[in-house]
Amino acid sequence: MLRSLLAKLNQAEPTPMAEDESRLALAVLLVRVGRSDDEFVAAEVERVETILSLRFGLTSQEAKTLRLEAEEIEQNVSDNVRFTRALKHAVPLEDRVGLVEALWEVALADEYRDDIEDGFLRLVCRLLGVNDRERAFARQRVIAMTKK
């Protein structure tokens, strides 16, 4: 599956992804936001696995396996434009704000808002077609959710 996803990401115009590839694509974005400040701490790792488990109905072991596979891909895919374009084609616009909320959950999991993570999220949101207003609202919803 890794080779298949990498091949699709490297196409000039990505083809639609299968469901398992879309899962992996989201997992890679979650890992990438966690690593964007060069510190992928335990709280972020745990949040990635929890998001994957809840979103896709995975066991904790399946979520961990998916995260580990995503970490490997994240190291081999440096082009955010091709990657987010492929994911954008796989996820309807109305569902992309949910992806942004998941990304914020990882970014804020360590209870530290970093400028590098903010910048990465701004870029990814723009590439996913989510505007700054929706990105800000998504962040506010995540912050409110974590205070409960």
Image (spheres, rainbow, N blue to C red):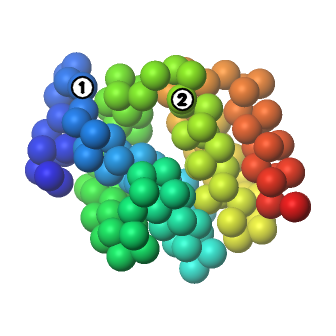
Q: CA distance from mark 1 to mark 2?
A: 16 Å
Q: Residues within 10 Å of mark 2 (few under 14, many from 20)?
A: few
Of residue 8 and residue 145, the one placed in the foreground of this image is 145
The three-letter code of the residue at mark 2 reads Asp
Asked if one can make out residue 74 in the rendered structure from this viewpoint, the answer is yes
Q: Position of residue 4 (x, y in %)?
A: 12, 44
Asked if one can make out residue 71 in the rendered structure from this viewpoint, the answer is no
Residue located beneath label 1 in the image: 16
Give residue 39's quadrant in the image.
bottom right
Q: Position of residue 97 (x, y in %)?
A: 61, 32
Q: Which image quadrant: the C terminus?
A: bottom right
The three-letter code of the residue at mark 1 reads Pro
Which residue, as the protein is rendered here, is positioned at the far bottom? 42
Q: Position of residue 100 (x, y in %)?
A: 61, 39
Residue name at image x 77 percent, y 68 percent: 111
Circles 1 and 2, Cβ within 8 Å, touching? The answer is: no
Residue located beneath label 2 in the image: 95
